Amino acid sequence: MTAGDPWETHAGWWQEEFTDGADAEYTEQILPLAVEHLAGAVDVLDVGTGEGQLARMAALGGGPRVVGIDPSVAQLAVAQQRAGGPTYARAAAPALPFPASSFDAVVACLVFEHIDGVDAAIAEVSRVLRPGGRFLFFLNHPLLQTPGSGWIDDTILDEQYWRVGPYLHEETTLEEVEKDVFIPFVHRPLSRYVNAMAGAGLLIRHMDEPAPPPGFLARAEEYREAASIPRLLFIRAEKDRPPQGR
């Protein structure tokens, strides 16, 4: 962490806007998807846990052992206060402080678009997963939510359309997500993630591009115009099992 780290400075903004039932995309879409795909998991790691809402959900009922890691002190302090069952540790995705094969499920929710060392981070996910373990990967859709994308109301041509930004260019931008709240985003094409997973022995088993949920579309009239444009990409990958000996 460095002085002026936006994730330390703006932790309160994230907690108020996206946790504890405040955000429809989490409550109506992301958390239910995670519940579905975590079913049966015994040892779960939540990478980039923030204040821990997904980790708490995974720990409901006292079933699996859940660990959440995050580099932000401000986020982890609130995660500890809100408790709920998980264990928390300060760490970054490219250097996970766990032995190999420690978990049968790893979750990364809207995290990798803020990580610089993507190859190291995905390799670390694979390392700490047991053979056959699952990686649940949630991402702002890398094509349709590219920086510069947005709904265009063209009064000259009298039509509306969704403009896609420069998809193939990998770049980091500082986005003003709310007045005076600037957060860095790293855009990469989808192939970058898929090839990193393949190189780390993570095989894609399932992918979803869900429509924005009703609670999000109801926020503003103009959101309904983009109801067919997914904001979220979800991938479930599994760690390749070594070939069986004869």
Image (spheres, rainbow, N blue to C red):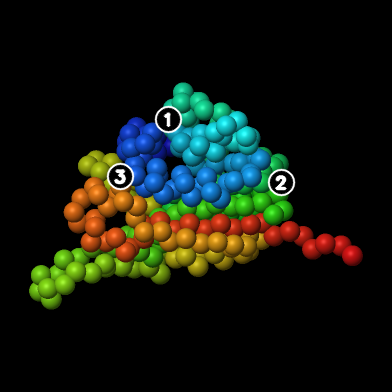
Dot 1: element: helix
- Measured along the vertical axis of the image, is residue 4 above or below residue 189? above
- Number of other residues with Cα within 10 Å of mark 3, as a class: few under 14, some 14 to 19, many 20 or more: some
Front position in the image: 119 or 65:
65
Q: Where's residue 184, x and y in %? A: 37, 49
Mark 2 or mark 1: whose residue is earlier in sequence: 1
Dot 3: element: strand
In the drawing, does residue 67 fall left or right of residue 5? right
Q: Amino acid at mark 3?
A: Phe
How far separated are the C-alphas under marks 3 and 1? Answer: 16 Å
Instruction: Identify residue for label 1.
Output: 74
Residue at image position (62%, 52%) is 134
Identify the mark at residue 182; answer none if there is no mark: 3
Q: Amino acid at mark 1?
A: Ala
Dot 2: element: loop
How far separated are the C-alphas under marks 2 and 3? Answer: 36 Å
Identify the mark at residue 200; answer none if there is no mark: none
Q: Where's residue 112, x and y in %? A: 48, 52
Residue at image position (42%, 30%) is 74
Q: Is residue 193 visible from the viewing direction of this image?
A: no
Residue at image position (87%, 62%) is 245
Q: Where's residue 21, x and y in %? A: 36, 36
Q: Amino acid at mark 2?
A: Ser
- Number of other residues with Cα within 10 Å of mark 2, as a class: few under 14, some 14 to 19, many 20 or more: some
Instruction: Identify residue for label 2.
Output: 101
Residue at image position (34%, 52%) is 213
How far separated are the C-alphas under marks 2 and 1? Answer: 29 Å
Front position in the image: 222 or 103:
222
Of circles 2 and 3, the one toward us is: 2
User: Quadrant of the image for the C terminus?
Assistant: bottom right
Mark 2 and 3 residues: CB-CB less than 8 Å, in contact? no
In the drawing, does residue 106 fall left or right of residue 181? right
